[in-house]
Image (cartoon, rainbow, N blue to C red):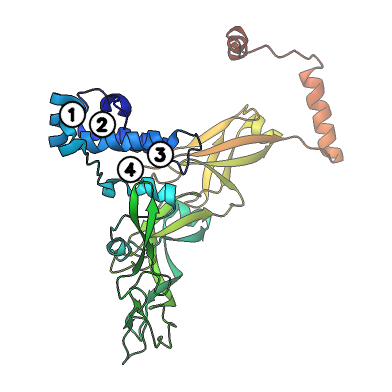
Amino acid sequence: MTQRDYYEILEVPRSASPDDLKAAFRRLARQYHPDVNNEPDAEEKFKEINEAYAVLSDPEKRAAYDRFGHAGVRGPGGSQDFTVDFSDFADIFSDLFGFGGFGRSSTRSRNAPRRGADLQYRLDLTFEEAVFGVEKEIEISRDEVCSRCGGSGSEPGTKPIRCSTCNGSGEVRQVRQTILGSMVQVATCPNCRGQGEIISTPCHTCQGRGLERRTRKKMIEIPAGVDTGTQMRLAGEGQPGINGGPNGNLFIAIQVKAHKYFRRREFDILLDLNVNIAQATMGAEVEIPTVDGPTTLKIPAGTQPGKILYLRGQGVPKLRSNGRGDQLVIVNVEIPTRLTTEQRQIFEQLAKSLGSEVRPQERSFLDWLKETLGG
């Protein structure tokens, strides 16, 4: 083999830590393995990388190499042992060879407890229900442990049998020859799908799944102040866990229906209010709707179109804090399009009284400031 410096081969300094060496080996092995690199010298480079890591990853060999160089790691007659423990690099060779593990059992990970899947339920609320909160009954369809077989999947009175293909291990192994020697390919048993057992007599209720579909009714409390897009999490109300793992969660997605009069802006409620020209000019007291019920609103004399009147504290309760938003009343002055004879006479008299002079509207300070500052 080449006499190049092992640290140079792995592209690390002589002070490199074991983790640095491991990271370098992983990176270079992926780059130069002949199965993924078609360059003519890829195989020689990979052997060189393997040799360098085999020496430097062993504390005793590394110490001998640092002191005596290549001569320090040669055995009697110049022989060398460059064996690498590949157990830490199963992911590399899984990518390269298409199989996982070098004699390492994956049965434990397959049979380990796993959390169940989450579920989502869309809940439609009226505007008022979202504002003040409500208690709702919902129906959830989900898998639950089979009531007949208790989750085993086997008909009561029978038991699963050991898989003859994998002898109960849940995996099968094949030996494959590579440039590094014989390597063991570990794969999930195709007969039992990794369970190690075969259900000879499936449960009549769940057909061997161990789970059955059920619909449950549940009362849930919706807090005041929710809005479209709000999600509530009900822990443990999702799909059942696997191999004894915890259940998943149920997420309630809130959708609020549009209201006939009200709109919402965060915790404020907006109401568009049409008043006639006499009410806007002379002022008036009018009855308007709120989420708390009808209330009286005073329209100031001389109210202009677009003016906003505030009803403090009559908006939406604030989630996770005290207080409520406001109700904003946006005033729109209606201009009549049809007049009775009497109304026309009144407007004609008003027109004579007001005169015919018109005045261009002066630009506001805000408009001037926006233009000055470039928008």
Q: Quadrant of residue 21?
A: top left
Residue ranking furthest to the bottom:
157
- Which is in the foreground here, disc 3 or disc 2? 3
Badge 1 is on which residue?
Answer: 71
Badge 3 is on which residue?
Answer: 30
Q: Earlier in the sequence, mark 3 or mark 2?
A: 2
Q: Position of residue 248 (x, y in %)?
A: 36, 62
Q: Earlier in the sequence, mark 1 or mark 4?
A: 1
Label 4 environment density (alpha carbons within 10 Å; few <14, some 14–19, many ≥20):
few
Label 1 environment density (alpha carbons within 10 Å; few <14, some 14–19, many ≥20):
few
Q: Position of residue 51 (x, y in %)?
A: 28, 36
Query: Which numbered circle lies on residue 20?
Result: 2
Q: Amino acid at mark 1?
A: Ala
Residue 150 shows in the view: yes
Secondary structure state at the residue bearing disc 3: helix
Residue 223 shows in the view: no
Considering depth in this image, is 225 or 350 the residue closer to the camera? Answer: 225
Query: Which numbered circle lies on residue 261?
Result: none
Badge 4 is on which residue?
Answer: 321
State the CA–CA distance, disc 1 to disc 4: 74 Å
State the CA–CA distance, disc 3 to disc 2: 16 Å
Considering depth in this image, is 25 or 373 the residue closer to the camera? Answer: 25
Secondary structure state at the residue bearing disc 2: helix
